[in-house]
């Protein structure tokens, strides 16, 4: 399994604090859904993390995965933004390709660093798209994730590379993040807000086989 499956950065604190949810991907009204989504994402991530790497990879057929993604970044004033979204991925084992999208983002600037909470989460319009997704070697996967998200007064442009793998025997889930990509010396992640580069961007994706 490439790397250790862990939550990334300060977002892990919020997800751990909200770990009483189910892992069924759901999202309600953006202004009230952030904590609920964090709880569900934490539960799913914990379940996926506990699974062993997939040891016998299929060489044909396909599988769909549904779950969550988390994006974090910090501006020059040390204000951290944390976003969560739904994630849908498709793996084609015959062609060794992975596609997918991250949609229905919700979040905002962290208002209480001690509890990692956001006072007024906002919806972000737009999807991030997985491209050049490749399966292998073994259970590993890599993909580029990019596109633009918008909310009130903000245009957020994301260009990222994630690395991870398939888990469960038989296959039950998938996970990928920027930390594993960085450890493999893959291209880094960049986030700009209204054209200004942000600091310490991270992205994780987890999904359960449907």
Image (cartoon, rainbow, N blue to C red):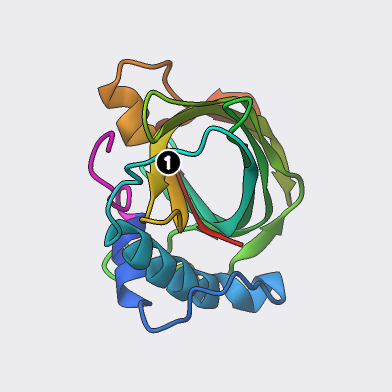
* Image quadrant in which the C terminus is located: bottom right
Residue 116 position by quadrant: bottom left
Q: Give the magenta range.
A: 1-10
User: What is the x, y in percent for residue 107?
Assistant: 57, 60
Horizontal arrangement in the rendering, residue 188 relative to residue 46 (left or right): right
SS for tag 1? strand
Q: Which residue is mark 1?
A: 176
Horizontal arrangement in the rendering, residue 55 relative to residue 189 (left or right): left
- Residue at 32% across / 42% down in the picture? 55
- Residue at 38% across / 84% down in the picture? 20
Give the vertical position of 192 relative to 21 (above or below): above
Residue 104 position by quadrant: bottom right
Give the residue at the far bottom of this rendering. 20
The local crowd at label 1, few if under 14, some if 14 to 19, many if 20 or more residues have their Cα within 10 Å, is many
Observer-nearest of 94 and 175: 94
User: What is the x, y in percent for residue 199?
Assistant: 40, 31
Q: Main secondary structure of the magenta part?
A: loop
User: What is the x, y in percent for residue 141?
Assistant: 45, 31
Observer-nearest of 145 and 31: 145
Horizontal arrangement in the rendering, residue 24 relative to residue 22 (left or right): right
Give the vertical position of 156 relative to 85 (above or below): above
* Image quadrant in which the N terminus is located: top left
Give the vertical position of 59 relative to 14 (above or below): above
Horizontal arrangement in the rendering, residue 154 relative to residue 11 (left or right): right
């Amino acid at each position: 399994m490439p790397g250790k499956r862990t939550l990334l950065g300060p977002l892990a604190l919020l997800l751990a604090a909200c770990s009483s949810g189910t892992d069924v991907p759901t999202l309600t009204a953006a202004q009230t859904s952030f904590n609920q989504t964090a709880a569900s994402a934490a539960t799913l991530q914990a379940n996926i993390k506990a699974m062993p790497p997939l040891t016998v990879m299929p060489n044909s057929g396909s599988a769909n995965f549904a779950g969550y993604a988390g994006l974090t970044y910090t501006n020059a004033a040390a204000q951290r933004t944390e976003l969560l979204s739904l994630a849908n991925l498709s793996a084609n084992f015959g062609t060794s390709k992975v596609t997918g999208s991250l949609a229905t983002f919700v979040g905002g600037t962290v208002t209480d660093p001690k509890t990692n909470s956001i006072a007024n989460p906002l919806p972000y319009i737009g999807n991030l798209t997985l491209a050049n997704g490749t399966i292998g070697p073994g259970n590993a996967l890599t993909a580029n994730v990019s596109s633009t998200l918008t909310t009130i007064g903000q245009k957020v442009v994301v260009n990222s590379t994630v690395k991870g793998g398939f888990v469960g025997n038989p296959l039950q889930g998938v996970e990928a993040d920027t930390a594993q990509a960085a450890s493999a010396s893959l291209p880094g992640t960049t986030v700009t807000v209204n054209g200004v580069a942000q600091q310490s961007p991270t992205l994780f994706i987890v999904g359960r086989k449907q």
